[in-house]
């Protein structure tokens, strides 16, 4: 008798899963990160950004998509960086590994609020062309 109930429970679970459709991974998420470097911290911030990308690649957290890091100057003097890359899955930043969290802490330590904007901003983007 218990065996029949177990079989029915198993069959019901299979039917429910089949009706839900195939399991899919989340679509990749492209982000643009803008970092306003504190005066005197520009070189160290550039190194942290480079280590961040190396770690993301080593841990296989990035999708096979373009990556770029840019450096600019606001009003000709205040340095900022822009990094653009694509997370393999949008859930990765919400459950980032400890190595990534440590690098994010370093980034936040090396940036400053500027012109009413946070020291570090992250914007979701859409890739238009490769």
Image (spheres, helix red, strand yellow):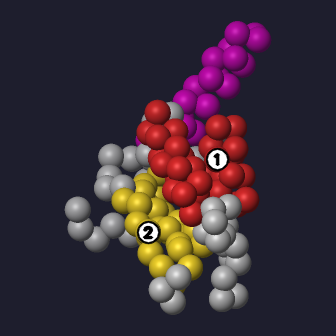
The part of the image, by quadrant, that contains residue 78 is: bottom right
What is the x, y in percent for residue 27?
A: 43, 54
Q: Does 7 sit above or below residue 100? A: above
The answer to whether residue 90 of the structure is visible from this angle is no
Q: Which residue lies furthest to the left in this view?
A: 130
Q: Mark 1 points at which residue?
A: 103
In the image as oriented, which residue stretches furthest toward the right? 2
Per the image, label 2 sits on a secondary structure element best described as strand
Query: For the residue carrying disc 1, how many other residues have a C-alpha within 10 Å: few (<14), some (14-19), or many (20+)?
Result: some
Q: Residues within 10 Å of mark 2 (few under 14, many from 20)?
A: few
Q: Gap between marks 2 and 1, in whole Å?
A: 19 Å
First in sequence, mark 2 or 1: give its number. 2
On-image quarter of the N terminus: top right
Q: Residue at x 73, y 59 (%)?
A: 109
Q: In this view, does 36 lie above or below 86?
A: below
| Residue stretch rendered in magenta on the structure | 1-22
Q: Do the residues labelled 2 and 1 touch (CB within 8 Å)?
A: no
Please state which of the two labelled residues, at mark 2 or mark 1, is closer to the viewer: 2
Query: Which of the image's four quarters has the C terminus?
Result: bottom left
Q: Quarter-wise, where is residue 110 in the image?
A: bottom right
Who is closer to the viewer here, 26 or 120? 120
Q: On the image, numbered disc 2 is attached to which residue?
A: 71
Instruction: Find out whether residue 43 is within the magenta segment.
Output: no
Q: Residue at x 70, y 10 (%)?
A: 3
Q: Residue 20, percent across and down?
A: 52, 46
Q: Is residue 104 above or below residue 12?
A: below
- Residue pictured at 65% horizontal, 57% vertical: 107
Q: Position of residue 19 (x, y in %)?
A: 50, 44
x and y, in percent, of residue 126 in the image? 39, 69
Q: Which residue is drawn at 76% across and 11% down?
A: 2
The extreme front residue here reads: 40
Whether 6 is among the magenta residues is yes
């Amino acid at each position: 008798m218990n065996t029949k109930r177990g079989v029915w429970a198993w069959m019901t679970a299979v039917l429910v899963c089949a009706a839900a459709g195939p399991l899919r991974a989340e679509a990749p998420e492209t982000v643009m990160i803008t970092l306003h470097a504190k005066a005197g911290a520009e070189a160290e911030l550039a190194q942290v950004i480079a280590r961040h990308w190396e770690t993301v690649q080593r841990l296989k957290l990035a999708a096979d998509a373009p990556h770029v890091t840019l450096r600019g100057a606001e009003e000709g003097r205040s340095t900022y960086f822009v990094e653009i890359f694509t997370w393999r899955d949008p859930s990765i930043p919400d459950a980032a590994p400890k190595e990534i969290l440590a690098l994010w802490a370093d980034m936040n330590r090396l940036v400053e609020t500027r012109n009413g904007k946070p020291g570090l901003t992250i914007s979701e983007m859409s890739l238009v062309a490769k």
